Amino acid sequence: MSGVATSRDGIPLAFEVHGAGTPTLVFVHGWSCDRSYWRGQVRPLAARYQTVAVDLAGHGESGVGRRAWTMAPSATTSWPWPSSWAWASWC
């Protein structure tokens, strides 16, 4: 399943969900990439867990309307997803 969520600062963030189970593993790409970076990990892990791959604001299919492009708005506090999800990686 693919979708778009709105960050707390109003930016549309694209994501895709595969699999089911707990914990939910969230894959966040590094600078200048998009969620496709994790394709090789997301699908195999989806056989056992729910996996979520996101596009950061300004990357991939996510929005670009942010006023300040600093690390603070990119932190998880700006994201609309549950804090109970297990954040798998940041590379």
Image (cartoon, rainbow, N blue to C red):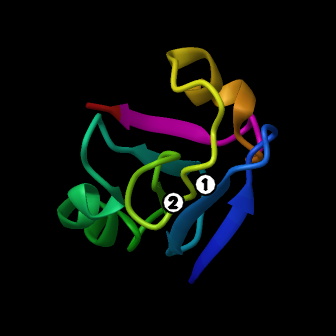
Residue shown at 27% from the left, 64% from the top: 36
Q: Earlier in the sequence, mark 2 or mark 1?
A: 1
Residue denoted by label 1: 22
User: What residue range appears in magenta?
Assistant: 82-89
- Is 26 left or right of 32, judged from the image as shown? right
Task: Between residue 87 and residue 65, name the one nearer to us.
Answer: 65
- Is 49 left or right of 73, judged from the image as shown? left
- Is 23 left or right of 10, judged from the image as shown? left
Residue shown at 81% from the left, 39% from the top: 8
Q: Secondary structure at mark 1?
A: loop
Q: Find out whether the residues at labels 2 and 1 contact each other: C-beta distance under 8 Å.
A: no
- Is 37 left or right of 8, judged from the image as shown? left
- Picture quarter containing residue 37? bottom left
Q: Secondary structure at mark 2?
A: strand
Residue 19 locus on image (x, y percent):
50, 75
Determine crowd level at label 2: few under 14, some 14-19, many 20+ residues with C-alpha closer than 10 A: many
Magenta segment includes 22: no
Disc 2 residue type (three-letter): Val
Residue 47 locus on image (x, y percent):
38, 74
Disc 1 residue type (three-letter): Thr
Seen as rendered, the residue at the extreme bottom is 1
- Picture quarter containing residue 82? top right
Residue denoted by label 2: 52
Quadrant holding the N terminus: bottom right
Identify the disc placed on residue 40.
none
Task: Between residue 59 and residue 3, name the one nearer to us.
Answer: 59
Residue 48 locus on image (x, y percent):
43, 66
- Picture quarter containing residue 55? bottom left
Quadrant holding the C terminus: top left
Front: mark 2 or 1:
2
